[in-house]
Image (spheres, coloured by chain):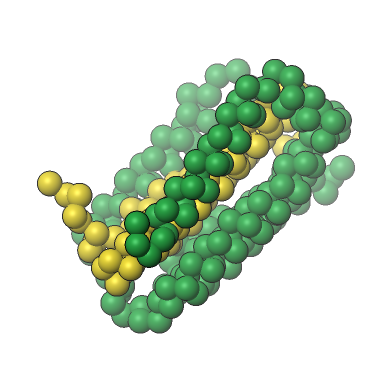
Chain colours: A green, B yellow
Amino acid sequence: MTAEPLLFFLLAAVAVTTAVLMVIQRNPVMSAIYLIANFFSLATLYLLLQAQLLAVLQVIVYAGAIMVLVVFVIMLLNLGDERALAERINLRILAAVVVAFALLLELLYLFTGAGAGNGSGALPPASAELGTVESIGSALFGVFLLPFEVTSLLLLAAIIGAVILAKKRV
Amino acid sequence: MGIPLSYYLGLSATLFAIGVAGVLTRRNAIVVFMCIELMLNSVNLTLVAFSAYRGDVAGQVLVLFVMAVAAAEAAVGLAIVIALYRNKQTVNIDDMNILKW
């Protein structure tokens, strides 16, 4: 039980480090690999939060399917010449970092600081049955049945759109 | 579980801000794309944390929907990147300005 805070801080450090490395890395392939590491640490955090199904889906869908797609496109486009995309430290990057840092301060104030209302303390933890396939499935096919069906339409539209956009001659 | 909810929210806020910084600074369209995925994941972490601490499964179902939307977004977005590369031979988003006034 005492290992949990240690595990959380370790995983949080890994997640933040890999995210920063992903952003500052020049090579897009290395960025993709750091993002995959970030996804794995988030999946383990989901396990800490008793969301077992989501942890498995995070690895399969994000670290598996989506990142394979991204790496495939990077390889397909063969972006060898990184000099053409050389990014210098200039006023725009400085402004972007300042804006992102201001957003971070706002979010931290809202979530953890004086702006947080009820719920910032350590609430009673959830039971281990919360994130099982059974409980999520019964919610998905009960209350959330209509959104679930609409999701299939969304995926169909995405498939058709992707095929038409990537075709050589439209 | 001795970890307060605010720690998870702070972590996801940090990840979101890193994603925003990446979207604003990077010029490679695919890296911008990956930063958007990072932001979606930080929101997922928020949803899972709230779901676990409130004992409500609705947050985790919402994460499933976010994953489906992210998959659709990845397919369409990467197809757009391929189409743009075919037309302009670049993935630098500063060169993609044909919709600009």
Q: Residue B61, how many percent across, how many down?
A: 68, 30
Report which quarter residue A68 is drawn in.
Answer: bottom right
Question: What residue is drawn where x is 77% and y is 41%?
Answer: A53
Observer-nearest of A60 and A43: A60
Is residue B42 in sight in this rendering? no
Q: In this view, does B57 lie above or below B22?
A: above
Q: In this view, does A50 lie to the left or right of B27?
A: right
Q: Residue A31, how many percent across, how many down?
A: 50, 67
Q: Is residue A73 left or right of residue A93?
A: right
Question: What residue is drawn where x is 63% and y is 57%?
Answer: A65
Quadrant housing the C terminus of chain A = bottom left
Q: Residue A26, how many percent across, how many down?
A: 42, 73
Question: What residue is drawn where x is 47% and y is 73%?
Answer: A76
Quadrant housing the N terminus of chain A = top right
Is residue A64 in sight in this rendering? yes
Residue sitting farthest toward the front: A169
Q: How many labels does the image show?
A: 0
Observer-nearest of B43 and A114: B43
Q: Is residue B39 above or below residue B82?
A: above
Q: Residue A91, how many percent across, how many down?
A: 21, 59
Question: What residue is drawn where x is 55% and y is 41%?
Answer: A156
Observer-nearest of A169 and A108: A169
Observer-nearest of A150 and B29: A150
Report which quarter residue A104 is drawn in.
Answer: top left
